[in-house]
Image: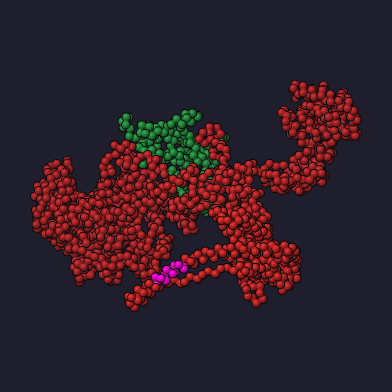
Chain colours: A red, B green
């Protein structure tokens, strides 16, 4: 601790030591043993040293002669110090000064610095820092502790001046308060005593006293003295700056002052007040009286550093690299081979002002004044130039020169050179003289006009009685020496006359010579004429006329040339005089020099008439500014200035344009502001200055502008583009346009450091600009035009040696010579070739690349091909071969027959269409919507909330539980074996039953069903008809049907049940395997596999030959007989996610050995119901486990996709499409499950309104002819015909994605189509047949979304299944149509808004708006859509021979196949049976598979009595051979291994028009009964 | 496959999802899966995994540590479609609903050696403020239909996401036959930073 040298401060320092030293004293001194408790040795040493210092200080202080009566004898010291301490405490109590207040703070601080012992800590906490106003006696303990407090004070940093002062004061007071002090010692003693025994005695010393209470006011007073509440009142600036100083605002001085942090004003005031209270508070304030603050560190936007843990070593790649900032090079577009100037240039534009030569606000006087002004200006300019005297001098000089020459040679002939010079001189004289004369004339006229205008002005001023312009023309008269002038005048005239004389003489001579020549010519001609006349006279009269005419034609009718007149000198002189008189002033006349001054006074506004006042007011309103546009960009604009009374606008602004781009244009736009909106008056184009023009040297130039604006005023302003006249009678009208001059100077700035540098660079630019810059000479767009370029190059004469031009010249060379064709395209990627890592050829060759490419293109075969081998050799050749074959197949048709060719063609075409659609779909698939990617809960609507509320009230275990949605599985983590198809085979109805072999009784059971009853199936018409069951033994097994489900070559069987109405209720599980293990949506929906549900009859034969073994062994043989099947495509299951219903089993019309079961107890009333079903039915529940969620997603996709299709293209009216979209949306909103179809996609991918498809079309005539009397039969036949057109076998692959609707002719041409094509065709046929027909759009099982046909006959609605040719009554139980979405006919579309959509519960009356919502309402105009169908369909007969050929081929193939399928057994063919079957097939065709079974069976039995025949005919439309083989295989006819089995096979194809073929296949297996009987007996059960 | 002329190359990845820094959330677990091209197929190891729920340490850093191992071997014939690991982090929200807290993806490093990757995590944003509120309230935040979306570029343009935090993964990569098949992923330049082992 150092003492400062200053003597004045010293005592204070001494005193400042006092508190600490006093403690030391206390402790160090023997009477204070308590100090031992806590003093450490170190402390002791310190204290000792301190004390020494103190002493030294004191002695020093004394020596300085401080008058303070400081008495601190060393022996008294401890006491004195203690006293001081106490007093100090008192002092605090009473102190009012702020010094004291502040005092308390350092105390605390000091305490904190110490390391407290436990006691210290206690004391610290027990001590009250604000000594209370209590007397010492009562608060002994407190005092003690306060003392301790002081004791604890370490001698640390008492440099504080405040403290010094304080102590100083304390010491000063010491004496004064002596009296008080006197009391203290006693207390002290008491206290001292306590000091010794402090720990133990404290409780004894405590006095119990009532709680101290200080009344509030007093306390407030006390607190006021102690506490300081900074006010939030604004602190006057004067307090904050040093005295006698004005606040200094740096910002105003132009220094940068950062933004201050945002502190609320109150807080700021509080802070300032607080600071001011402090000593040294001023240092917190800056010069401007504000608290010194750093600029606001808080950014306005938040930044977040990437997360990098501090421990982690920063990746070198992530480390920040600091680069120096570099100025980006200015972009100079199209700088072609030009020196690149490095620096930027500056263009200085000085615009002093603007002057109007005419303005719409000009008064008449102004117009005149302006004229005067202009002519005066003109005059001044002329005067400055002084052309007259110049010309005179010149003339004089030349004359003397000529004279000299003539004098020199003095008449002698001049040498030719001199002569020529003289001639030249003369010519010059002539020219100069003319000029002089004209100049003189001009001078004269100018003067005259000025005077004239001035007179006019004067007259006008007189007339209007006020003055608008300050102009005044004075004519100064200058007297001249008359004689001298006269002499000059005369001499000039003489000179001119002589010269002219000479000239004329020359001319005369020339003319004379000319005349002579001509005259000679004329003479010759005359002679000729005469001689010719003579000849003519000789020749005769006729020729003469001709000749004359001829002469005239020749035009050589020469006249006699006149002789030129010599010029008379006198007349010439007269002429000259006359002229000179006119243009020159007379000699001796005084010279008139006009002087224009503007000293005149303008009449004050008050004195003016109204119109003038208005004009002047209007003038005041106007203001003007100029926009500077550089390179077509506005760069700056002048301030807006008002118009002076003399129509000048003063700007006086200089603009410095820093230029980066080449200056191309510079223009000013003059704007006039009248009211709010500025209006452009004119544009002034300013030339870019030469580089030599630098600031300072550039003169001001005036650029004129004018505007064609028409302005008309009703006040004194003459307006613009308005005719007006100065004459009283209004004649001599003048039209003036607003015009004026901008005065400005444009120059290049001289660089700051070196003007030269900048100049040179800019020279480079400028010079090239003028000559070499293509941009300035040819427009940019013309750059591509080689012709323009070469033209420009020629014109500008490029320097070929200039390296800058080499490129350009090269181009031009090519362009002009045409050696190299200049490509007319622009290549973006010139180096593309070099980036290819393979040559195209190699790429083509490589199988691997090809494979990769095909996969990338998502070609169907390779779409999800996995692990394309890395090596070429590992790719099997046949992989690509197949694909290439397919590609070729489209071109090459393996035409075996004509029929096939047609069909392949059609199918190929269809394939192509499908592919294009597919690619389109794939493109659309890559177009994503948010809901494709992000799953987001919809905002719960009120309805949804309500539903969820009701679900709470539902019973926990309802009596009839409904199937709940299972959890859906996304496709991502599926693999083979995860997905299974569950088929729940519930029951079947009306399975055909076996015909017992033993029974020979032939029961003729012919169905009484006839055509008339078809449409009245409800009537129990057949009840009496069947008695087939009567003779049956009841122990006979009727049938043992079981169901076999086949899917993807996996086969599952149910157990065999008994009877024609079996009940299995078994669940079969079939594994599902996606193609190539790809379970993505696109892959799943393209699965083409079908699920076959086959119903078989199980026959069990007992093979046991020895009855004795019967007890011990079972030896049976089972045989299965196919009874029927149901085919369900996988996609249907996939899209429906579950199929639940009763399906009609496809039973063959004749099942040999079986008979249709029509119920045993046939007298019951329920027969009626039973007989509704004309066939066998099976109830199935099919689903996929786990449920594939994608089905839903695909649908979504389809929707958006269809929307995309909508967007694609359509010939439909946009409004119609929108309406359709709206209709669709609304329908969906109300009935989300019902199908609503308004617009469909045609084969070209265009959207077509659906009702355009409906149009009556005639069916083939032969169909109509077959049964003319029976309309029902005809209808059935037509439906049959339609159903014979094969369904597109793989249409399911994008059935759900987008349906393509072919028109009927397309359909018939392609011979393949979906349900909708069938339906449309059938509907159109029905319409042509005069029926009421509609298309039903709805859902059916098993096909899912489909189209049916509805007809209205005999007050009944009939539903037709177009692809099967079957029809149902509206109330039929097993109608496959499950729901109806909408009805369509040619005029309208109706959407089903009934409560139910099941056809049974519906009303099909579309006229009822309660049930059906029409698309075209009655009010809405029906746009009368024309149909897209052809007017009529063209039918052609099918080639019979080709059909026969095909028939043979199929038969042969099937026989081969069956043999092939039975590799372990010999396959024998029974020809006899086959032929008899063949005969039977046409009958089946005739009856369309109905009602012939029994007759046929009888027939067969007669023929082949010895055989047990088991077989059936199959019927199908012909599409290809492949499905036929498949169908035969699926029946399992071949799966019979009886040794002696024989087969019979017959194929019959019935041709219909347009190659529609109906194929019948009869397959039968025959077993000789003898063999049977000898080998086995039918099992008894 | 013969050693002399390999027809596939192998990529052996082992590593772990170390930790995540998601300052606002706690009690999170994560799932990972791999996205790879057609020419890749996993040979062994788990293609997908779900980690334990981890809570933040009360004492030290705010990181959520899983140390969830990844161990998988791929075989491939084509480096195109190099596998990416997709990590999605889930955890309970205020109401205890399990919501997504972040998606992130990163390519498996192509060079052999030890790598550490810190990937940002993000979640799709709700389409509107009302949606945002309801999704918050109902605990059904928007999620990607398939977390693998984050490894693909297709369809991302329709989404808006918010970043949530960071996740650190470490990988140890071993490749086999990559160089023999002509793909050189290790060069002098690259191998330098990898050589230094950082604990």
Counting every numbered tag in the picture gives 0
Q: Nearer the viewer, residue B9 or A1548?
A: B9
Look at the image and say whether residue A414 sits in the magenta stretch.
no
Tell me what residue is drawn at x 8 percent, y 50 percent: A1570
On the image, the x and y values in percent for residue A831 come to: 41, 42
On the image, the x and y values in percent for residue A4 come to: 81, 28
Quarter of the figure with residue A326: top right
- The quarter of the picture where the N terminus of chain B appears is top left
Q: Nearer the viewer, residue A992 or A1124?
A: A1124
Q: Which residues are magenta?
A: A518-529
Q: Nearer the viewer, residue A740 or A387?
A: A387
Q: Residue furthest bottom?
A: A541
Tell me what residue is drawn at x 46 percent, y 31 percent: B189
Quarter of the figure with residue A1420: bottom left
Quarter of the figure with residue B187: top left
On the image, the x and y values in percent for residue A962 come to: 38, 54
On the image, the x and y values in percent for residue B83 come to: 41, 39
Look at the image and say whether residue A522 sits in the magenta stretch.
yes
Tell me what residue is drawn at x 40 percent, y 33 percent: B184
In this orientation, does residue A1548 appear? no
In this orientation, does residue B128 appear? yes
Q: Is residue B109 left or right of residue A1400?
A: right
Tell me what residue is drawn at x 72 percent, y 66 percent: A589
Q: Nearer the viewer, residue A31 or A728?
A: A728
Q: Is residue A804 left or right of residue A1561?
A: right
Does residue A865 lie above or below A1413 as drawn?
above
Does residue A1348 lie above or below A54 as drawn?
below
**Which is the main secondary structure of the residues drawn in magenta?**
helix
């Amino acid at each position: 601790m150092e003492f400062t040298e200053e003597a004045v401060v010293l005592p204070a320092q001494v005193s400042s030591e006092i508190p600490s030293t006093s403690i030391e004293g206390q402790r160090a001194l023997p009477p204070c043993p308590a100090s031992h408790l806590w003093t450490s040795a170190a402390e002791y040493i310190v204290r000792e040293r301190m004390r020494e210092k103190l002493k030294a200080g004191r002695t020093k202080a004394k020596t300085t002669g401080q008058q303070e009566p400081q008495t601190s004898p060393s022996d008294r010291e401890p006491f004195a110090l203690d006293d001081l301490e106490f007093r100090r405490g008192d002092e605090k109590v009473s102190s009012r000064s702020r010094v004291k207040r502040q005092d308390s703070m350092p105390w605390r601080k000091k305490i904190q610095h110490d390391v407290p012992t436990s006691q210290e800590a206690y004391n610290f906490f027990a001590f009250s820092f604000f000594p209370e106003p209590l007397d010492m006696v009562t608060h002994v303990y407190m005092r003690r502790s306060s003392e301790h407090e002081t004791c604890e004070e370490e001698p640390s940093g008492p440099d504080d001046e405040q403290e010094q002062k304080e102590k100083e004061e304390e010491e000063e007071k010491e004496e004064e308060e002596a009296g008080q002090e006197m009391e203290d010692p006693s207390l002290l003693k008491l206290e001292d005593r306590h000091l010794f025994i402090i720990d133990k005695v404290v409780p004894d010393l405590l006095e119990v006293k009532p709680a101290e209470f200080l009344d509030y006011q007093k306390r407030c007073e006390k607190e006021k003295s102690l506490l300081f509440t900074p006010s939030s009142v604004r602190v006057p600036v004067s307090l904050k700056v040093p005295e006698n100083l004005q606040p200094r605002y740096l910002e105003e001085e132009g220094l940068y002052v950062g933004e201050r942090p945002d502190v609320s004003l109150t807080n700021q005031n509080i802070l300032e007040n607080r600071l001011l209270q402090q000593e040294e508070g001023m240092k917190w304030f800056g010069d401007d009286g504000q608290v010194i603050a750093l600029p606001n560190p808080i950014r306005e936007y938040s930044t977040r550093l990437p997360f990098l843990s501090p421990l982690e070593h920063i990746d070198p790649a992530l480390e920040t690299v600091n680069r120096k900032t570099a100025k980006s090079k200015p972009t100079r577009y199209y700088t072609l081979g030009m020196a690149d100037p490095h620096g930027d240039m500056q263009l200085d534009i000085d615009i002093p002002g603007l002057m109007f030569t005419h303005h719409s606000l000009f008064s008449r006087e102004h117009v005149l004044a302006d004229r005067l002004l202009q002519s005066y200006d003109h005059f001044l300019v002329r005067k400055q130039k002084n052309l007259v005297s110049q010309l005179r001098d010149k003339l004089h000089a030349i004359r003397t020169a000529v004279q000299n020459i003539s004098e020199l040679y003095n008449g002698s002939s001049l040498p030719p050179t001199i002569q020529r010079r003289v001639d030249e001189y003369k010519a010059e004289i002539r020219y100069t003289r003319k000029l002089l004369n004209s100049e003189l004339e001009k001078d004269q006229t100018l003067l005259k006009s000025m005077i004239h205008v001035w007179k006019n002005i004067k007259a006008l001023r007189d007339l209007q009685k006020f003055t608008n312009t300050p102009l005044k023309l004075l004519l100064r008269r200058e007297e001249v020496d008359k004689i001298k002038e006269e002499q000059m005048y005369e001499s000039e005239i003489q000179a001119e006359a002589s010269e002219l004389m000479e000239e004329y003489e020359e001319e005369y001579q020339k003319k004379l010579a000319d005349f002579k020549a001509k005259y000679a010519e004329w003479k010759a001609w005359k002679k000729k004429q005469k001689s010719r006349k003579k000849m003519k006279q000789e020749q005769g009269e006729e020729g003469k006329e001709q000749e004359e005419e001829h002469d005239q034609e020749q035009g050589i009718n020469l006249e006699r040339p006149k002789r030129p007149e010599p010029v008379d000198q006198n007349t010439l002189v007269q002429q000259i005089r006359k002229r000179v008189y006119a243009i020159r002033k007379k000699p001796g006349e005084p010279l008139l020099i006009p002087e224009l001054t503007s000293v005149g006074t303008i009449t004050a506004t008050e004195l003016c008439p109204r119109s003038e006042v208005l004009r002047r007011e209007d003038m005041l309103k106007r203001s003007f500014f100029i926009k500077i546009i550089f390179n077509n960009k506005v760069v700056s604009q002048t301030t807006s200035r008002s118009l002076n009374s003399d129509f000048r606008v003063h700007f006086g602004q200089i603009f410095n344009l820093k230029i980066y781009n080449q200056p191309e244009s510079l223009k000013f736009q003059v704007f006039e502001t009248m009211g709010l909106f500025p209006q452009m008056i004119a544009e002034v184009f300013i030339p870019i200055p030469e580089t030599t023009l630098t600031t300072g040297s550039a003169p001001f130039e005036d650029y004129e502008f004018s505007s064609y604006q028409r302005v008309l005023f009703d006040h004194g302003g003459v307006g613009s583009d308005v005719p007006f006249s100065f004459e009283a009678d209004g004649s001599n009208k003048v039209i003036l346009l607003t015009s004026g001059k901008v005065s400005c100077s444009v120059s290049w700035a001289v660089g700051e450091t070196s003007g030269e540098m900048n100049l040179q660079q800019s020279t480079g630019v400028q010079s090239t600009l003028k000559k070499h810059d293509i941009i300035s000479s040819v427009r940019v767009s013309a750059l591509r035009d080689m012709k323009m370029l070469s033209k420009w190059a020629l014109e500008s004469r490029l320097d070929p040696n200039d390296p800058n031009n080499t490129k350009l010249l090269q181009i031009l060379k090519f362009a002009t010579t045409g050696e190299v064709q200049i490509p007319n395209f622009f290549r973006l990627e010139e180096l593309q070739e070099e980036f290819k890592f393979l040559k195209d050829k190699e790429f083509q060759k490589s199988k691997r690349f090809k494979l990769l490419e095909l996969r990338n293109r998502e070609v169907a075969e390779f779409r999800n091909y996995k692990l394309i081998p890395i090596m070429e050799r590992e790719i099997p050749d046949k992989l690509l071969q197949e694909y290439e074959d397919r590609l070729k197949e489209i071109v090459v048709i393996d035409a075996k027959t004509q029929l096939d060719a047609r069909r392949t063609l059609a199918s190929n075409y269809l394939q192509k269409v499908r592919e294009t659609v597919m690619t389109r779909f794939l493109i659309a698939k890559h177009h994503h919507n948010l809901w494709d990617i992000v799953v987001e809960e919809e905002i719960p609507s009120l309805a949804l909330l309500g539903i969820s509320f009701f679900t709470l009230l539902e019973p926990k275990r309802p009596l009839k539980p409904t199937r709940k949605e299972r959890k859906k599985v996304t496709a991502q983590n599926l693999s083979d074996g995860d997905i299974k198809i569950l088929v729940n085979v519930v029951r079947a109805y009306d399975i055909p039953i076996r015909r017992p072999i033993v029974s020979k009784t032939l029961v003729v059971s012919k169905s009484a069903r006839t055509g008339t009853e078809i449409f009245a199936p409800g009537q129990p018409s057949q009840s009496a008809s069947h008695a087939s069951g009567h003779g049956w033994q009841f122990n006979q097994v009727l049938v043992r049907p079981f169901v076999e489900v086949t899917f993807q070559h996996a086969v599952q069987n149910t157990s065999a049940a008994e009877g024609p109405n079996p009940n299995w209720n078994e669940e079969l599980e079939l594994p599902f395997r996606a193609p190539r293990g790809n379970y993505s949506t696109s892959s799943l929906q393209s699965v083409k596999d079908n699920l076959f549900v086959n119903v078989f009859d199980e026959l069990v034969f007992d093979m046991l030959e020895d009855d004795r073994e019967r007890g011990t062994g079972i030896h049976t043989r089972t045989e299965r007989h196919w009874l029927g099947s149901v085919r369900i495509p996988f996609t249907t299951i996939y899209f429906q996610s579950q199929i639940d219903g009763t399906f009609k089993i496809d039973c063959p019309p004749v099942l040999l050995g079986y008979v249709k079961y029509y119920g045993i107890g046939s007298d019951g009333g329920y027969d009626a119901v039973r007989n509704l079903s004309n066939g066998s039915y099976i109830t199935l529940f099919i689903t996929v486990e786990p449920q594939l969620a994608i089905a839903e997603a695909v649908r979504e996709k389809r929707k958006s996709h269809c929307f995309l299709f909508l967007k694609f293209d359509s010939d439909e009216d946009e409004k119609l499409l929108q309406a359709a979209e709206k209709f669709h949306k609304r329908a969906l909103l109300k009935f989300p499950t019902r199908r609503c179809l308004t617009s469909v996609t045609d084969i070209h991918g265009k959207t077509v309104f659906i009702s355009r498809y409906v149009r009556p079309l005639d069916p083939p005539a032969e169909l109509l002819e077959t049964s003319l009397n029976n309309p029902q039969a005809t209808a059935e036949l037509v439906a049959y015909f339609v159903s014979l057109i094969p369904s597109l076998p793989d249409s399911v692959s994008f059935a759900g994605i987008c349906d393509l609707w072919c028109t009927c002719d397309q359909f018939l041409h392609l011979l393949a189509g979906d349900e909708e094509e069938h339906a449309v065709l059938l509907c159109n046929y029905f319409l042509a047949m005069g029926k009421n027909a509609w298309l039903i759009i709805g859902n059916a099982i098993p096909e899912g979304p489909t189209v049916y046909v509805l007809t209205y006959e005999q007050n009944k609605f009939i539903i037709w299944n177009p692809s099967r040719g079957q029809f149902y009554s509206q109330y039929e139980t097993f109608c496959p149509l499950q729901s109806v979405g909408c009805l369509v006919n040619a005029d309208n579309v109706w959407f089903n808004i009934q409560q139910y959509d099941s056809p049974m519960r519906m009303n099909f009356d579309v006229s009822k708006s309660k049930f059906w919502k029409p698309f075209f309402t009655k009010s809405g105009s029906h746009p009368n859509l024309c149909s897209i169908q052809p007017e009529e369909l063209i039918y052609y007969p099918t080639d019979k021979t080709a059909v026969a050929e095909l028939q043979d081929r199929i038969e042969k193939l099937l026989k081969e196949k069956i043999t092939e399928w039975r590799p372990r057994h010999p396959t024998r063919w029974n020809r006899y049976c086959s032929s008899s079957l063949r005969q039977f097939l046409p009958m089946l065709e005739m009856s369309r598979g109905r009602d012939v079974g029994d007759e046929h069976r009888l027939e067969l039995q007669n023929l082949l009595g010895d055989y047990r025949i088991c077989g059936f005919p199959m019927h199908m439309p012909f599409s290809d051979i492949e499905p036929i083989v498949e169908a035969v295989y699926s029946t399992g006819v071949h799966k019979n291994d009886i040794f002696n089995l024989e087969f019979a096979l017959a194929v019959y194809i019935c041709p219909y028009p347009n190659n529609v073929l109906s194929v019948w296949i009869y397959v039968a297996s025959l077993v000789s009964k003898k063999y049977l009987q000898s080998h086995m007996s039918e099992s008894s059960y | 496959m013969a050693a002399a002329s390999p027809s596939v190359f192998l990529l052996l990845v082992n590593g772990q999802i170390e930790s995540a820094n998601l300052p606002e959330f706690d009690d999170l677990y994560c799932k990972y899966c791999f996205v790879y091209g057609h020419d890749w197929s996993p040979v062994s190891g788990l293609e997908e995994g779900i980690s334990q729920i981890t809570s933040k340490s009360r004492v030290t850093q705010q990181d959520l540590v899983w140390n969830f191992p990844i161990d998988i071997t791929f075989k491939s014939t084509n480096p195109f479609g190099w596998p990416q690991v997709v990590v999605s982090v889930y955890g309970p929200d205020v109401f205890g609903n399990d919501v997504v807290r972040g998606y992130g993806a990163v390519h498996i490093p192509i060079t052999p050696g030890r790598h550490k990757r810190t990937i940002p995590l993000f979640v799709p944003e709700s389409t509107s403020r009302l949606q945002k509120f309801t999704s918050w309230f109902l605990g059904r935040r928007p999620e990607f239909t398939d977390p693998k979306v984050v490894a693909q570029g297709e369809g991302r343009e329709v989404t808006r996401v918010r970043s949530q935090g960071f996740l650190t993964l470490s990988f140890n990569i071993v490749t086999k036959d990559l160089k023999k098949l002509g793909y050189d992923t290790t060069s002098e330049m690259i191998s330098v930073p990898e050589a230094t082992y950082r604990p």
